[in-house]
Amino acid sequence: MNDLPMPAKPDDSKTREELLREIKELRQWLNDMEASKLQATQDEEIVRVFRSSPIGLFILQDGKFKFVNENFRGVVTGSVTDLLETESMKLVIPEDREMLRDNAIKMLKGENIAPYKYRIITNTGQIRWLLEGVVSIHYQGRRAVLGHTMDITEREKAQERLEEAYEKERKARQDLEAEVQRRVEFTRALVHELKTPLTPIMSSSELLVSGLKQEPWLSVAKNILRGAGNLNRRIDELLDLARGEIGRLRLRPTRVNVIRLLQQLGGEMMALAANNGQALTVELPPFLPPVWGDEDRLRQIVLNLLINATKFTPEGGKITLRAKDAGQQIIFQVQDTGRGIPEDEQKLLFQAYHRQANDEENLSGLGLGLSLCKLLVELHGGKIWAESEPGKGSTFSFSIPVRPTEQEQEQISGA
């Protein structure tokens, strides 16, 4: 019987299943002893084997310690002599005593096989966590309880730190969401306050432009209309970006004829480019497959890139609008022969409110256009990027899938 294997030394990496297995091995070992030894011999064998065991073991009768081994003593940092005949519940913190008693009874009755955890107070005042399982045995001629424990203090402390970190992260996320919501509400209020007086300005300036024939009044009216239109677009960009940040910007995707769309935009922008002394050309293949997208938003993206190109291309420069088939996607490109963008600024181009250091037209926008383009392209399931070399111009490209993405397919199915 002395050769029966005892469970390995417990540590913080052990699981409840491992503790259960060790309890089962102990129970089998005890059953084998009861079948082959007299009670006195059994008691001696229990004490001899358990004393040298690396497992935290104790024996209770009438709620008092009758035996504790070195491993258990090391956990509670008291001597063996001090613990003997001591009521076991005195080690347990008051809040855990009822729970411990209920769990131990359920395990002894076979109603619950899961090890349970509780806290003890050591003789140095420390609080430590134990994971425990119990079995019923005979000891000194009477029924007793054999307890099998492992110290899981470090594991519980790590869990507490993890829960604290999670709680901090959850609160930070809630604070961020609240801040984003406040920002969106402020943006909405701002848009409303700006749109309200802007609407009569635009309608009145349109009426003046249509009715005036004499200069310089016609030019003045056109300037008012142009400025009001620019302001209106900036306000829409601000609202779109705020909606996009909280996931409320929605697309209305359909099949879009790319060639027709780009030819229309090219025709609309040629007059502006000509007024700036620039040449705008549209280079398209004979055929391009339609893309799945929101035509109004695609128009917005291309128009924004074309307007940027006219801003940064000098008189006599060239702007090219093109598109090409790249298999499962269409690549849109706006190329200019402007002053180009320094390499250190290229990675910041699509950040909201970023403005190029060499942008002399400080009142021409809020720096939202490219950020909004990026948002709209990504909502379509595409990507946007820029290639530029100072003094040689820039090329802004973006991709739009030809077929609906899985998410778009779900939208179609749910419609």
Image (spheres, helix red, strand yellow):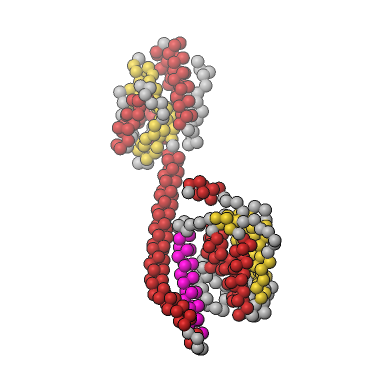
The residue sitting at 38% across, 20% down in the picture is 136
**181 is within the stretch colored magenta:** no
Instruction: Give the x, y percent position of residue 183.
Output: 41, 63
The residue sitting at 40% across, 49% down in the picture is 167
User: In the shown orientation, is residue 384 left or right of residue 129?
Assistant: right
Is 176 in front, or is 41? 176
Is 24 in front, or is 391? 391
The residue sitting at 41% across, 73% down in the picture is 199
**228 is within the stretch colored magenta:** yes
Instruction: Give the x, y percent position of residue 73.
Output: 41, 32
Residue 52 in view (yes/no): no
Compared with residue 92, is residue 413 higher up or lower down, i.e. above or below?
below
The residue sitting at 33% across, 25% down in the picture is 105
Instruction: Give the x, y percent position of residue 398.
Output: 61, 61
Q: Which residues are magenta?
A: 219-245
Is 306 in front, or is 238? 306
Is 8 in front, or is 205? 205
User: In the shown orientation, is residue 269 left or right of residue 251?
Assistant: right
The secondary structure making up most of the magenta span is helix
Instruction: Give the x, y percent position of residue 84.
Output: 35, 27
Compared with residue 64, is residue 38 higher up or lower down, i.e. above or below?
above
Residue 188 in view (yes/no): yes
The image quadrant of residue 332 is bottom right
Compared with residue 163, is residue 397 higher up or lower down, i.e. above or below?
below
Q: Residue furthest bottom?
A: 215
- Count the labels in the image: 0
Compared with residue 246, is residue 273 higher up or lower down, i.e. above or below?
below
The image quadrant of residue 149 is top left
